[in-house]
Image (cartoon, helix red, strand yellow):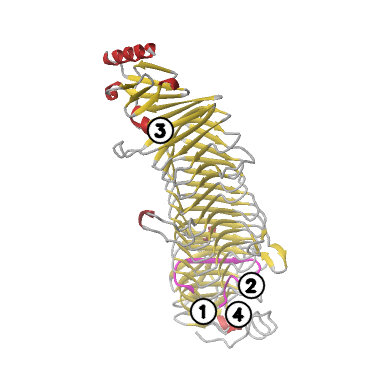
Amino acid sequence: MKRILFSIVALMLTIAAGAQTLNVKVGSVVYQFPAADAGDMTYTDGTTLSIMGRTFTLADVTSMNVDESEVTANQVTVSYNGSAATVYVAGNVAPYVSATVTGAHVSISQTNTDAIDGDEITYTLSGTTTDGEFSLDGSYKCTVALNGLTLTNPSGAAINITNSKRIQVSAKSGTVNTLTDCANGAQKGCIYSKGQIQLQGNGTLNVAGNTAHAIKSGDYIEVKNLTLNITKATKDGINCNGYFQMKSGTVTISGVGDDGIQCDLDGTTSTGETTDHEDEDSGNIYLEDGTLKVTITAAAAKGVKAAGDLKVSGGTIDVTTSGSGAYDSDEKDAKGCAGLKSDGNMAISGGTITLKSTGTGGKCIKTDGTLTISNGTINASSTGSQYRYSSSATASAKCIKSDGNMTISGGTITASSSTHEGIESKGTLTVTGGYVYAAASDDAINSASHMYLKGGYIMANSSGNDGIDANGNMYIQGANVFAVAARQPEVGLDANTEGGYSLYIQSGNVVAIGGFENGASISGGTAKSATYSKNTWYGLYNGSTLAFAFKVPSNSSMGNNMAVYTASTPALKSGVTGSGTTFWNGYGYAGASGGSSVTLSDYNSGGGFGPGGGGGPGGGGHRWAPFMPF
């Protein structure tokens, strides 16, 4: 005991001589007290020593020494080295941090930190181990900084945080960090946090989940700046509750057994989006900036799936799904993959989005609510066939589908489907602006209810059905439209006359290969008819003003005639040279020069819409009605 006392006296004299740090080592944990802050040290009954509020039982102390190292306040450093780990605790947080180290398995309990000027503790992890973990328990916010860490846990999660507060997981700039968990474990993720996770930093984080999710939060997840690579997960790549927000950074997800990103409600009732997402529990996903690349191969899995709304406002998004369809026994329905999926509404107001779906029953965009597109660039293709579980449980492969209304007011959209509709709304479809190109073997653009084409440039290219098909009324009120249908009985513009609805063309500029629906109400302009040649550029003129230039595709099956409409007497030139803005996947130009005039005839004299024609009796299904004069 005297020896311990003499050692303490010597250490105090050394500190007084100007040394910087007193290190108190307890097993694999080193508590570091800056000399300037250590103050009085209380030595009691020869058994305990108290320094800066931390009391040590001397029998547990492995060693004490003084050196000239510097201590950063509020810092806890964990250094992994093979089968061992060492924890360094800054003296000002020593009263609040208890660490247990078994080999390279580190477990830390954090208590009250209010006395640290409101600042939070940062845990910095570095080094390499193939048999370790980092476990943290507490009730206060903190940061887990990864500084060149390679950590594998063969018996559980690599990082397991049961603290229910906000946790920042930060990869330090210029570092590469790799986390791997075990297979067949009980953990919910390779990285698990009971509370919120903010994934950030200018470094790289690689995560492999061998039991469940790669990253799992019981609350929201935010991503900023980080380069995050999820290389494996038996379930979702990222799974969270409340909401998910990607502000910036690069996220790449592949090798997952279910969805790329999935966000659910934490409770049973949605708060909806809140100001600054404060206390939000919406199930919403916000993709605001950065680069997101997701590759999905699992059956009926989703690239990005929101239990609430999905909002895309910026960034570069690339999602590929190749999994087949599957039967959902809970919902008793067939399901397919989807690149972007929302159980609520979906809004796209910016960004560059590339979506590919190749599996049976797959879709690029699927929303159970409304779909609103106001800006951005979307390139989407669906090449799969229908998934069929039974005669009553099927999933069709479509490109863009909303179960509610769909509104397009801006942006550039290219959507193609090999076997079903290109763009489909199960409600009302309204287009007021933007550039829209849809190609399909079924209807290129379809709505289950009314359709309003009020603005923008719209091309619908169907190789096997109607170009544009509304199951209610169709109103063209200012849009620039180029619709291509398969040969009769299909038509370029089809309204549900069988159900008592009509096609109303009231303003705009329109070209329809296959013609207009019988009984169309045409006002505010003039409709004419012309023959056409495949793979040829034409210019549609509203009087002497060019409306747009367009190229006729070379589909194997196309309607026999071409109907055109403009506000004044239309004029048509063939063989023009396009110029200026290009759109419609290369089939349209805003400007044109040259060309030869095409002879136009009255539309109702050569359109083939009388008895026996494409829409008359015997014509294959479009109910004939007297043609309404224009």
Q: Secondary structure at mark 1?
A: strand
Nearer the viewer's eye, disc 3 or disc 1?
Answer: 3
Crowd band around label 4 with a 10 angstrom C-alpha radius: few (<14), some (14–19), many (20+) = many
Can residue 254 be seen in the rendering of this structure? yes
Nearer the viewer's eye, disc 2 or disc 3?
Answer: 3
Ranked by sequence position, the earlier of labels 4 and 2 is 2
At a point 45% along the width and 63% down the height, the residue shown is 434
Can residue 173 be seen in the rendering of this structure? no
457 falls in the magenta region: yes
Q: Quadrant of the N terminus?
A: top left
Q: Quadrant of residue 22?
A: top left
Q: Which amino acid type is marked by label 4?
A: Gly
Crowd band around label 2 with a 10 angstrom C-alpha radius: few (<14), some (14–19), many (20+) = many
Which sits in the foreground, 479 or 298?
298
Up the image or down, 307 lies above or below 92; here it is: below
Badge number at residue 527: 1
Q: Which residues are magenta?
A: 452-471
Q: Secondary structure at mark 4?
A: loop
Residue 26 as seen in the image, left or right of residue 93: right
Which sits in the foreground, 410 or 72?
72
